[in-house]
Image: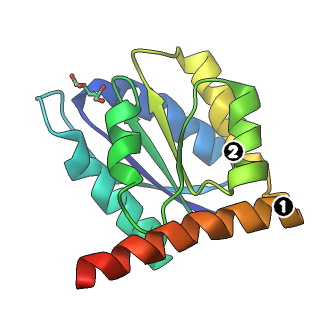
């Protein structure tokens, strides 16, 4: 898979570790910044990653900031993105199986590199269950997007 990866200044150390994990699993990684420790704004790095995913240029996206929270909030504003803020392995697997999440957000100030590597590994190697009830629920999320996209166009 092709993985788009973005961080703010609070995620740059974890980003380096995560890139190794992604490559180690045989995936291609596109680093969309940020590249320095100067203070930047996380929505500016969430958006390009999410746009790569919704356009199909990337299969999945990974976002890192201090907590993962700002990144996940910003990402979930992009229609077509299902971003999971995840700091444990159980949730990483479950969000693939149940929610078909296409982006994951992590906080460098929350998890250490060892746990983050296990989370990313679980998330990248778990498939959506395709179970009827889960497909139906994801379709309901898509219906919410449709509803609010339409109301915005009015
Ligand atoms: C940056 O200080 C911090 O606010 C940001 O990385 C993130 O945690 C926001 O949700």
Q: Is residue 25 visible?
A: no
For the N terminus, the quadrant is bottom right
* Colour treatment of the image: rainbow
Is label 1 or label 2 in front? 1
Instruction: Using the image as rendered, state which of residue 128 and residue 4 is in the foreground.
Output: 128
Instruction: Using the image as rendered, state which of residue 16 and residue 137 is in the foreground.
Output: 137
The quadrant in which residue 28 appears is bottom right
Instruction: Using the image as rendered, state which of residue 20 and residue 96 is in the foreground.
Output: 96
Label 1 SS: helix
Q: Which mark is residue 74?
A: none
Residue drawn 12% across the image and 29% down it: 39
Query: Is label 2's Cβ within 8 Å of ligand 1?
Result: no
For the C terminus, the quadrant is bottom left
Residue drawn 56% across the image and 70% down it: 142
Q: Residue 125, image x and y in percent?
A: 77, 48
Label 2 SS: helix
Which quarter holds ligand 1? top left
* Residue of label 1: 133
Residue drawn 85% across the image and 58% down it: 129
Q: Residue 11, image x and y in percent?
A: 34, 29
The quadrant in which residue 50 appears is bottom left
**On the picture, is 45 further left or further right than 85?**
left
* Residue of label 2: 95
């Amino acid at each position: 898979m092709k993985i788009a990866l973005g961080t703010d200044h609070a995620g740059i150390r974890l980003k380096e570790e995560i890139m190794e994990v992604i490559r180690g699993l045989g995936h291609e990684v596109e680093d969309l910044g940020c590249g320095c420790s100067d203070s930047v704004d996380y929505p500016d790095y969430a958006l390009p990653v999410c746009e790569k995913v919704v356009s199909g240029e990337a299969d999945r996206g990974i976002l890192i900031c201090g907590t993962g929270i700002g990144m996940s909030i910003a990402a979930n504003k992009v229609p077509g993105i299902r971003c999971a803020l995840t700091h444990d392995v159980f949730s990483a697997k479950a969000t693939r199986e149940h929610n078909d999440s296409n982006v994951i957000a992590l906080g460098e100030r929350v998890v250490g590199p060892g746990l983050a590597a296990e989370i990313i590994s679980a998330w990248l190697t778990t498939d959506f269950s395709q179970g009827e009830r889960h497909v139906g629920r994801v379709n309901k999320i898509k219906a919410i997007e449709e509803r609010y996209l339409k109301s915005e166009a009015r």
